[in-house]
Image (cartoon, rainbow, N blue to C red):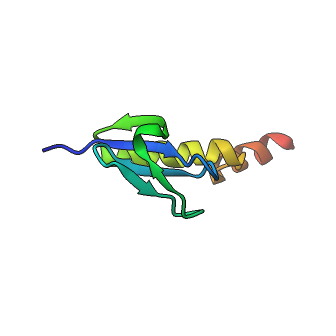
Amino acid sequence: MKRTYLVVACPKCRGLLLALQGRKTRQCPYCGTKMKLTKTEVLWVTSDLEEARSILHSKRQDRSGLMTANEYQKQISTDF
């Protein structure tokens, strides 16, 4: 049976994490909140674990406003 992965946001701290679809609860690794997955904001759904990890990384980066090393290199090369 193929697994389905969810990218979810903790309702308390807004931390982003992965969860398996079909599970009822998940504990946030950042603040410890035990959340009901049926009442948790789902940001992405996929059956591909690597895609889920990539989306999670991308969404975390979007929230943090940080640049990747490649983005930084492009920016400093155009500044001069």
Q: How far across and how far down the image is residue 55, in percent?
A: 47, 42
Tell me which residue sits at (48%, 43%) in the image: 8
Is residue 7 found left or right of 30 in the rendered image?
Answer: left
Tell me which residue sits at (32%, 48%) in the image: 49
Work out whether residue 74 or residue 14 is closer to the camera in this orientation and state it: 14
Is residue 38 found left or right of 28 in the rendered image?
Answer: left
Q: How far across and how far down the image is residue 10, in percent?
A: 55, 49
Q: Quadrant of the C terminus?
A: top right
Work out whether residue 33 or residue 29 is closer to the camera in this orientation and state it: 33
> How many tags in the picture?
0
Is residue 31 found left or right of 25 in the rendered image?
Answer: right
Outermost residue, left side: 1
Q: How far across and how far down the image is residue 33, in percent?
A: 54, 59
Outermost residue, right side: 80
Tell me which residue sits at (43%, 47%) in the image: 36
Tell me which residue sits at (39%, 42%) in the image: 6
Is residue 38 found left or right of 66 in the rendered image?
Answer: left
Work out whether residue 77 or residue 8 is closer to the camera in this orientation and state it: 8
Q: How far across and how far down the image is residue 32, in percent?
A: 54, 64
Q: Quadrant of the N terminus?
A: top left
